[in-house]
Amino acid sequence: MNNPFRVRGHGHIDRDTTLSFTFDGTAYTGHPGDTLASALLANGVHHVAGSIKYGRPRGVLAAGAEEPNALVQIEAPFPEPMLTATTVELYDGLVARGLSGQGRLSGEPDTARYDTMHAHCDILVVGAGPAGLSATLAAARSGARVILVDELPRPGGSLLGSQELLDGAPASAWVSDAVADLDAHDDVQVLHRTTAFGYYDDGLVLALEKRTDHLGAAAPAHVSRQRIWRIRAQQVVFATGAYERPVAFDDNDRPGVMLAGSARTYLNRFGVLAGRRAVVFTTNDSAYPAALELADAGMRIAAVVDAREEVPAHWRTACDERGIEVRAGHVVTGTSGIERVSRAHVAPFGQGRLGDRRGIDCDLLLVSGGWNPAVALFSQARGSLSYDATIGAFVPAQAPDTVRTAGAASGTFTLTGCLADGADAARGALSALGMTGRSVALPAAAPLPDAAPSRVLWRVPSPKDSPDGSYQFVDLQRDAVVADVLRATGAGLRSVEHVKRYTTIGTAHDQGRTSGVMASGIVAEALGVDVADLGTTRFRPPAVPVAFAALAGRNRGELFDPVRVTALHPWHVEHGALFEDVGQWKRPWYYPQAGETMDEAVLRECRAARTGVAMMDGSTLGKINVQGPDAGVLLDRLYTNLMSKLKVGRVRYGVMCGVDGMALDDGTVIRVSEQEFLLTTTTGNAARILAWMEEWLQTEWPGLRVHLTSVTEHWATIPLVGPRSRDVLALVAPGLDVGNDAFPFMSWQDTTVAGIAARVCRISFSGELAYEINVPAWDGITVWKALCAAGSTFGITPYGTETMHVLRAEKAYPIIGQDTDGTVTPQDLGMSWIVSKKKPDFIGKRSHSREENQRSDRKQLVGLLPADERVLLPEGAQIIATSSVPAPPVPMLGHVTSSYRSDALQRTFALALVRSGTQRIGETLYVPLDGGTVPVTVTDPVLFDKEGTRRDG
């Protein structure tokens, strides 16, 4: 249970506390401050996962988000798939297993909390390494509002993974002083464990903060597990560092093959030696400090294999002092081993085939092919890149005025240069804000010998008999090899974007951090073009994987699509209503009595509305208050009919059309006063119509003096329907004259109902005598119960939406969205009368005159009566002209939009959109159903009380 590869005197872990965890069924221990990857390496575990395509063993390659191999599934305390072991902080009780490139979602609900925060700042700094800290200090000391985000649990960045000195002391001392300085500034906010993953327009940066992931089962239930930060910054400094680049050679995917800088990080940040005997393969200077520090910590460095012909003398001297052999002008051509590297094959690097492939025994092969600046966020900000041939990488070139890069992210790889870069970036950002930047005293880094030029090397030619690169891996996560790239170019692909999609390189969770630039280099070599001209693939958000739960935040379950209920909902529940979802609302569907089927309940409710008295909860209708001197002008432009001439106290039905002339919504308009109207919309369209009206008002007609207010939830609306509705209303509103003369159809009056101030409208969506009673929502239940009591003598019956649909369909009152499909004009609905010929213009008017909208064979709303009065046609069923279904393609005449059983008609009926429908009235058409066809007669859509005599009682 000990950690055999843990080294004393190194690392930033809490050695006094031991954490227990399980990986692939075996128990291990680690310490706070470990990642799962570092804890596994400390226990000598290198085989962490399998490859997705070939099933080859894979180990830890990197130490951060660039890790392509070590994918794990967390099993406890909460299941989560597809995490990288290098970014999972260790906690007590962690249970995980390795994955072969894909995981499984948990069947259990995630009980953790997630939330979102909004923040604004003058300058956002991404990355708390040396460049990011110096930029933040410079900005903070100049009085700017600064937010610093960093993915690690503590600031320091690359300084945590090295033994760099600042002012002659360990760099950690300067980091601590810098953090204390920032803590003293009220306008500085430092977010740890926070990864910026997306840059969007207008300085919006999204970042993911992992608040309790590192606590496991000990996480407080009241604290959100993860938080999305939506940060609006006037200036952004990307100090995101760089990723070390591997080199492709035969069998470069074996466990034990690791990036040199990552092995250095495991030593200095976690106190872990990733192996006992290592070979270092490099093309640049950066691998030497790693080799030397590892050797000083007790690792045997068998050899440094340097692809360059000349190795700087200072590195040779340092290696000689430690007994490290340096092989200049050599490359690693391949590896041997079963579950882990056991030998690295080395040969001189020259023209043609490689020979003399001597092997060096090792359990660790450290590779450094150079460094790629982390430019994903910079590119998302529409910054352009240019190729730097000296380092073999793409670096920031031109940037928007609001974006800057610093340190390794801009191609600066010395500590002194990173510190200066950060301060310069902050000064540039402050200047853009019109602020004066104060000078910041930067610490002095230890002097370094002059760096020798790097050798740009994408792959080592395979010495095998078939040197096609079949075992030279480019994208370890996708199991994509050099041979895949060569097949792509051989097939004629010339764009790296096309090669990316052909090979899937760069499409995994790591976003091609270790494979993307290498792939570009190999493609360029295969095509014989300059990689600078070829370029690299585009970077898109999110830059790191983000859980859907985090993106949803609190918008999950009922909060994802909020369940809305009316003020009368408790009464409906108490009286056994069944509900249907209409938009976000729970509306009573029907009220079954003991032993009743749905059909029986709906027929009973319809009978009550047609012969006695019934009432329903209509509170969900969208209600928009329109006020202002130009309110009538606005409504005239929005509706097809004239609203500005409506008299106070009257009500008018209206239809809105889109710019294409198609019916968009319908409802009533009440004129409250000379400058105030109240309009209603369909339940599901309320928010859409308000947004539609605001869009026209704000963007097209900003000169109109109008204000719009949603008052949907302010009012409880109760339609009281049926021949006896007048009698019931008279009992609860004794001060209201409910006669036809005093209270005509399509008018409204303010009165008192059951002692409550109310607005009563003579409106009917059923064709019966009806009143809509509107009261403040909090008084709705009082008025509803009073109507129930007053109507008990008359057998008053509550009814739901299904009955409402039957009643309105019998009268051919259309429902926008059910009897229309976005291609239907008011004329198609038989409502030419509602399209004003007096108004000079309204939205959609010009489209009505289009030739397409004048065709005689357009689909029009008609009624359908099945020959068998018992057959209920399915809504959506197609309509054909023949009694048998012809061979495909079958010519369709239209489809059924609404279909019901009718108590008033004593049969089934339907509404339908049929080509040339009004010309087909009296014809027999057919509806394919159950392997045969059902004959139907086309009728006028109004099937009940065509004269409309019942609405006045």
Image (cartoon, rainbow, N blue to C red):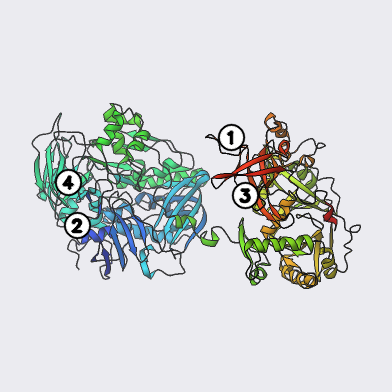
* Quarter where residue 775 is shown: bottom right
Residue topped by disc 2:
273
Residue type of the residue flagged with mark 2: Leu
Q: Nearer the viewer, residue 680 or 166?
A: 680
Q: Earlier in the sequence, mark 4 or mark 3?
A: 4
Residue topped by disc 4:
280
Q: Earlier in the sequence, mark 3 or mark 1?
A: 3
Q: Residues within 10 Å of mark 4 (few under 14, many from 20)?
A: many
Residue type of the residue flagged with mark 3: Leu
Q: Nearer the viewer, residue 862 or 666?
A: 862
Name the residue: 79% across, 41% down: 833
Determine the secondary structure under disc 4. strand
Residue topped by disc 1:
891
Q: How far is mark 4 from mark 2, CA to CA?
A: 14 Å
Of marks 1 and 2, the one in the foreground = 1
Q: How far is mark 3 from mark 2, CA to CA?
A: 74 Å
Name the residue: 57% across, 39% down: 884
Of marks 4 and 3, the one in the foreground = 3
Q: Earlier in the sequence, mark 1 or mark 2?
A: 2
Answer whether residue 33 is visible to the viewer in this image: no
Q: Nearer the viewer, residue 773 or 316?
A: 773
Answer whether residue 320 is visible to the viewer in this image: yes
Residue type of the residue flagged with mark 1: Pro
For the residues labelled 1 and 4, say whether their Cβ atoms are less than 8 Å apart.
no
- Left or right of 10, for residue 542: right
Determine the secondary structure under disc 1. loop
* Quarter where residue 905 is shown: bottom right
Residue topped by disc 3:
873
Q: Position of residue 742 (x, y in %)?
A: 91, 59
Q: How far is mark 1 from mark 4, CA to CA?
A: 73 Å
Name the residue: 78% across, 54% down: 767
- The total number of labels drawn is 4
